[in-house]
Amino acid sequence: MREIPRPDYEYEIAHLVSAYKRAVSDILRELERLDLTDISRAQAQAALAEVARILASLNEESAAWVAANIPKAATDGVAAAIFALGVAETFEEARSIAKFNRMNRAMVDAVIADTQADLLAVTQNVERKVRAAVRQVTADSMRANMARGVNGRRTISRDILDGLRKKLGDSVNTGIVDAAGRRWRPEVYVDMVTRTKTMEAHMEATINEGVAREAFYGVISRHGATDACRNWEGKVVKLVPDAPGNYPYLGDLRGGREIFHPNCKHVVTPVRKPVE
């Protein structure tokens, strides 16, 4: 069996994650410029306009990243199947002849759309929370000043100011809350999403190309996993549910907790005959 090369998109993912880190830092700096002791609605609106500009630029960059890197991962997946099945002598040769069949074209379009939606949800959530926090902080600041009958720098206590600053910072640092109620920092969530989606595109493309070339089985890669994935390393799986043999169907394993979970690095090498 020719084991396929392990896909590696660390450099590309790190580049996008850095863009989100920069955006978060830029937004925090913008919010820190607000004079919370005497904030006006005009100042608040100007800050929100700048936050919106930062996030719009980030959305453009992330959309371009997805459009470039999801097809790249899928092309690597097609090449992996071509190489594993002996159609090409080297992976480089396999990549030079790799093309998307109809299934893979549809798959790539779907993964691009899903990934862009996931990333857009991060910036939309940040903008929504920042907007709500700025409105609340502006109102709190005005009330604190009015309560003392003075509009000056000594009217708001340090504790109140610290609390207002914390509200603003928290609005940026919680990029998204997932279905399980976990709060993710924007850059951490983006790292998880892009890592998972590039691997998904790679594996789907590998499977689709393998099945198109009448390879209905696969072998799960080994890399010395220490989590529950270790129980599946080297195991034979079916790439289609009606393939003969008492092997688990890959589709039933994906998205579970033991193997092929988010951030999972395992791949499947397609084979025409089951090999243990």
Image (tube, grey):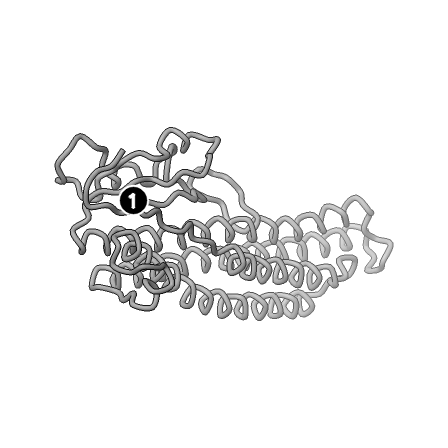
The answer to whether 161 appears left or right of 9 in the picture is right
- At 40% from the left and 33% from the top, the residue drawn is 229
The answer to whether 114 appears left or right of 263 in the picture is left
Q: Nearer the viewer, residue 148 or 57?
A: 57
* 2 lies above or below 142: above
In percent of width and height, residue 130 lies at 59, 57
* On-image quarter of the N terminus: top left
- At 83% from the left and 57% from the top, the residue drawn is 150
Residue that lies at the very extreme toward the front in this rendered image: 89
For the residue marked with disc 1, what is the amino acid?
A: Met
The answer to whether 209 appears left or right of 230 in the picture is left
Q: How many marks?
A: 1
* 46 lies above or below 5: below
In percent of width and height, residue 115 lies at 40, 57
Q: Nearer the viewer, residue 124 or 18?
A: 18
- At 42% from the left and 67% from the top, the residue drawn is 68
Tell me if mark 1 has few (under 14), some (14-19) or many (20+) residues whose alpha carbon lies within 10 angstroms of its own: few
- At 29% from the left and 60% from the top, the residue drawn is 88
Q: Nearer the viewer, residue 92 or 173?
A: 92
Q: Nearer the viewer, residue 88 or 25?
A: 88
Q: Which residue is mark 1?
A: 1
Question: Which quarter of the figure has residue 151?
Answer: bottom right
In percent of width and height, residue 110 lies at 30, 59
* On-image quarter of the C terminus: top left
In percent of width and height, residue 41 lies at 66, 66
Q: Secondary structure at mark 1?
A: loop
